[in-house]
Amino acid sequence: MPANTAMPANTAMITIKNFGFTVVGPITPGQKVMIHNEDSEAHTVTADSGNAFDVNVPASSTATLTAPAKAGTYKFHCNFHANMHGTLTVG
Ligand SMILES: [Cu+2]
């Protein structure tokens, strides 16, 4: 048993706070990823290219993203705020 059990294995999360994304991995293909929006504005987690994922996260709310089935590095953004960018690494 690992000494550090603060985070259960295979838990992934995206936190949105102050118009920024924080991604906590690891993220495995097809995994459900919790998205917490701590801002008082709605945001989206939208893949930059293709339609790998596009999730709307209402203000002060939580949503779920299904990670792509294919391993890789997926850059994403918020549809409402052009300066918000993040990277989802699936593998
Ligand atoms: Cu936004």
Image (spheres, helix red, strand yellow):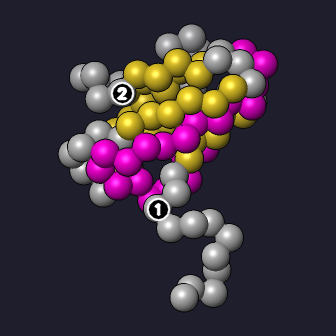
> Label 2 belongs to which residue?
53
**Position of the C terminus by quadrant:** bottom left
Q: Is residue 12 left or right of residue 53?
A: right
Residue drawn 21% across and 45% down?
70
Could you say which disc has been placed on residue 59 in the image? Answer: none
Mark 1 secondary-structure assignment: loop
Measured as percent of width and height from the top left, residue 19 is found at: 68, 26
Q: Is residue 27 above or below residue 53?
A: below
Q: Nearer the viewer, residue 36 or 18?
A: 36
- Residue beneath disc 1: 10
Please state if 76 lies on the left or on the right of 37 as rendered. left
The percent coordinates of residue 1 (x first, y second) are 54, 88
Between disc 1 and disc 2, the foreground one is 1
| Above/below status of 82 relative to 17 | above
Residue 7 found in image quarter:
bottom right
- Three-letter code, disc 2: Phe
Horizontal arrangement in the rendering, residue 62 relative to residue 27 (left or right)? right
> What residue sits 57% from the left and 11% below the top?
80
Residue range in magenta is 21-41
